[in-house]
Image: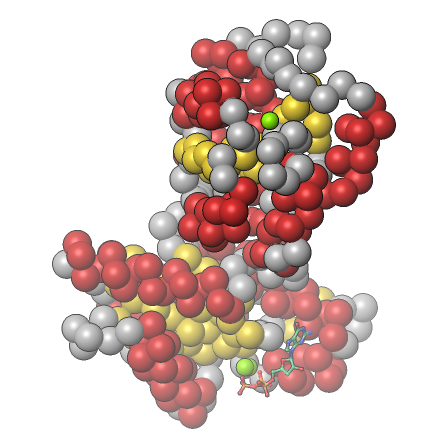
């Protein structure tokens, strides 16, 4: 670091980034036998909006990892019972923590020992003493990238939408919110009609374009608060908070028309596609995610049997 960081401006950037990212403040776990030093780092990071926890007893490390779920681990090198690199290797034994950046923070200046520590299981090496701004920036950059990577990996690669398990989690979250706020909510299950024949006639790659086109249209037309996921191959789930089934039907009906109006062209053909959808709401007070999705699926089945290219609720 040559250029000093302007802390107030970094602070406002941190706040902005908290608002842009789901999952709340960055979580930092500090492992250091020097409790006073750990408390000092905790203060610096904590004062800048990060959530910090410390471990001084290495025997409690794994339990703490499980309970705290850090975005970044700050690891001392020399401790009485175990070395930092040894502990880092133990952390890496668990697949869940392969992506968590481990940053060594040590007074170790011997380049060979630093490299050895990095090769064992670490991502970065900071030499103590470190300025507050350099500590903050290093941790911030590591945490932000780690979050971005996990968010990207959590998304469906064809459409960029949430995957099956994650959209179900959103259904759960929105059911909970709807109950707490005594608001309606709706779930839509959307399935492209006769998609098998699109693949058969125009090829799988072209089929992929149709899936992407529908996903883009849904993203454009739904509200920012709505959650959207690719539930299966050519099947999508949308969660609409604070929206009753009648309004959900109207929104989906507009999207259905817009999708049906799109023209897809290959070298030789121009054709149109359609989808059918089923909508359900929290009509029964005790319905959970699976029951809500089952009900939407039953409505989808009705729409298919009634001739497709329609919405049932
Ligand atoms: P229906 O109107 O009853 O929904 O008929 P359908 O042909 O759409 O229904 P079905 O579920 O039988 O076929 C879905 C097809 O979607 C089968 C599968 O090969 C195809 N598919 C699934 N995932 C993908 C994908 O990622 N890309 C492409 N191109 N096709 C996919
Ligand atoms: Mg130490
Ligand atoms: Mg299907
Ligand atoms: Mg289909």
Question: Which quadrant holds residue 244?
Answer: bottom left
Mark yes or no: residue 261 visible.
Answer: no
**Residue in the image at 14% along x and 58% along y:** 182
Classify 290 as above or below 50: below
Near-viewer residue (36 or 148): 36
Question: Which quadrant holds residue 186?
Answer: bottom left
**Left or right relative to 200: residue 272:** left
**Left or right relative to 82: residue 283:** left
**Residue in the image at 76% along x and 18% along y:** 109
Figure quadrant of the C terminus:
bottom left
**Residue in the image at 63% along x and 40% along y:** 82
Near-viewer residue (59 or 120): 59
Image quadrant of ligand 2 equals top right
* Spot occupied by residue 193 in the image (x, y as percentages of width and height): 54, 81
* Spot occupied by residue 172 in the image (x, y as percentages of width and height): 34, 65
* Spot occupied by residue 209 in the image (x, y as percentages of width and height): 68, 65
Colour scheme: secondary structure
Near-viewer residue (248 or 103): 103
Classify 46 as above or below 9: below
Mark yes or no: residue 175 visible.
Answer: yes
Classify 105 as above or below 27: above
Figure quadrant of the N terminus:
top right
**Left or right relative to 80: residue 275:** left
Farthest residue to the right: give it. 112
| Image label count | 0
**Residue in the image at 67% along x and 19% along y:** 107
């Amino acid at each position: 670091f040559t250029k000093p960081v302007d802390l107030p401006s970094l602070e406002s950037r941190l706040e902005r980034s908290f608002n842009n990212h789901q999952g709340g403040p960055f979580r930092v776990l500090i492992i250091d036998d020097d409790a006073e030093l750990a408390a000092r780092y905790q203060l610096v990071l904590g004062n800048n909006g990060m959530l910090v926890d410390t471990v001084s007893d290495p025997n409690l490390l794994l339990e703490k990892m499980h309970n705290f779920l850090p975005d970044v681990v700050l690891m001392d090198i020399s401790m009485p019972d175990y070395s930092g690199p040894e502990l880092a290797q133990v952390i890496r034994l668990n697949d869940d923590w392969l992506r968590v950046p481990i940053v060594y923070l040590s007074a170790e200046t011997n380049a060979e020992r630093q490299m050895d520590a990095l090769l064992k299981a670490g991502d970065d090496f900071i030499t103590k003493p470190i300025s507050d701004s350099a500590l903050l920036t290093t941790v911030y950059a590591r945490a932000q990238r780690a979050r971005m990577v996990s968010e990207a990996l959590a998304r469906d690669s064809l459409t960029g939408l949430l995957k099956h398990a994650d959209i179900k989690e959103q259904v759960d979250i929105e059911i909970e919110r709807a109950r707490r706020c005594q608001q309606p909510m709706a779930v839509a299950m959307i399935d492209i009609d006769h998609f098998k024949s699109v693949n058969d006639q125009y090829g799988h790659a072209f089929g992929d374009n149709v899936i992407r086109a529908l996903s883009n249209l849904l993203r454009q037309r739904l509200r920012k608060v709505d959650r959207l996921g690719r539930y299966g191959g050519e099947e999508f789930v949308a969660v609409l908070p604070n929206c009753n089934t009648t309004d959900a039907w109207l929104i989906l009906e507009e999207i259905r028309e817009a999708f049906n109006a799109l023209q897809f062209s290959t070298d030789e053909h121009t054709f149109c596609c359609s989808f059918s959808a089923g909508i359900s709401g929290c009509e029964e007070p005790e319905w959970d995610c699976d029951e809500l999705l089952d009900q939407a699926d039953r409505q989808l089945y009705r729409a298919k049997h009634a001739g497709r290219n329609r919405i049932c609720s």
